Image (spheres, rainbow, N blue to C red):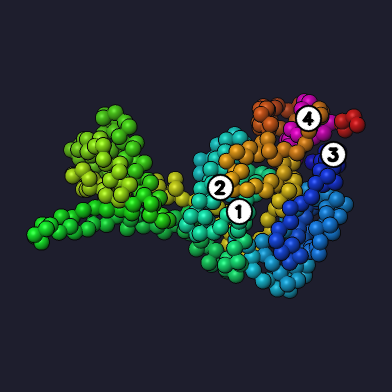
Amino acid sequence: MKALTRSFLSSKFREYYLSSSLEVPPGFSSREWGFVLFDQPGMRRHKSYFSQGELMDYVRSMVPSHIYHSAAYYQRPSAPTMKEKLWQGADLIFDLDADHLRDAPKSYGQMLALVKKEAQKLLGFLTADFGFSEKDVSLVFSGGRGYHLHVRDRRVHLLGSDERREIVDYLTGRGLDTEKMTFKVVLTGDVGTERVLALRCPPADAPGWGGRFNQAVLQFAKEIRSQDRDSAIKRLTGIKGIGKTLAPEFYCSLQSDRVLDDIRAGNLDSPKGVQKIWPFIIKNYLADQFVKVLGGETDEPVTADTRRLIRCPASLHGGSGLRVTPLSISSLEDFDPLWDAVVFGDSPVSLQITRPFKTEIRGEKYSLLEGPVEVPLHAAVFLMARGAAELVRYPPG
């Protein structure tokens, strides 16, 4: 990045911080703070502050490109070594980044839409499976390609790295044995002589992974029901163990009006004849699919690290110029980071594009080749922060 570009970005960040304040976390004075500056390599850390005003004085004078605070609470947060800081506990944090998602699209907008769905899924795990109250979960758009979730329930503060990894294992379904999700029961007739084996799975309202397993089975049944006969049979015979005889039988059985309700109840052998087919589907198809689709995503090293620094809400992301935006859980659905996290205006800025670059921001798509171009300020800041452009000259005024 050239000096002119760096100076311009710094001036715009200063304007933002002169009119805005950071959203400081609870236990503010017990946190370590870290900063990356525009004109200096590396991170300045081991900082602490007694008041928000003191912090803002530093930010407005130094104008960092990135601002972080610790997930941990320390007795001496400004001590120069981790041992001397005297760790007292840490929030449980999750970092969702599109870079870590399977088959993430290349389009920035589509990438952000996908990672938002993962954030919603992760919130479901935290509130439904772990029982955390929404008031103890803080949600933040990272300003880049994802979301940060901070759990500030006191019950998690003293968890060590191993316990935090176990939480990640649960979220991602690591080590989950799908074959144990089904079981056989013996039904005895009125006269005490009739014995019938029935195949069961957790019902739809079962807590945790049991309910998710039911969801996967139900979704598979719906997909087969919705296909024409030839397509469905072709799909079924592609599953190891299901031959040309069993596939038509299974397809016909799923057309029953009551079969979906039976599956929701955990009954996998109604109508009759289906029981012997489900184990093949579960072992040879669903076992590979449902954890990938229904499991949570997070950056495990971030969650396991009890001394991690995380971006400060309401700061600017030096790699995008977007606002690290704090959100309520209810506002996530309607949140559009390419509109709602944009803080700069529309005045024209002359740039030199240094490499071909495609992006979208505030409803406008850009497909830029190397060379001169004029774009609105909000797009210019984004392109310069991403390292795709250099400033040609300061805009007038």
Q: For the point 70% across and 73% down, which residue is it?
A: 86
Q: Secondary structure at mark 2?
A: helix
- Which structural element holds mark 4? loop
Magenta span? 373-392
C-beta proximity under 8 Å, tags 2 and 1 = yes
Distance between the alpha carbons at the discs numbered 1 and 3: 32 Å
Q: Amino acid at mark 1?
A: Leu
Give the CA separation, mark 3 to mark 2. Answer: 34 Å
Q: Is residue 373 left or right of residue 110?
A: right
Q: Quick one: label 2 or label 4, which is nearer the N terminus?
A: 2
Q: Earlier in the sequence, mark 1 or mark 3?
A: 3
Residue farthest to the front, as pictured? 190
Mark sitting earlier along the chain (4/3): 3
On the question of residue 38 being in view, the answer is no
Residue at 64% across / 69% down in the picture? 89
Give the mark nearer the N terminus: 1 vs 4.
1
Quarter of the image where one finds residue 24: bottom right
**What amino acid type should be assigned to the residue bearing mark 2?**
Ala
CA–CA distance in space, label 4 to label 3: 16 Å
Residue at numbered disc 1: 149
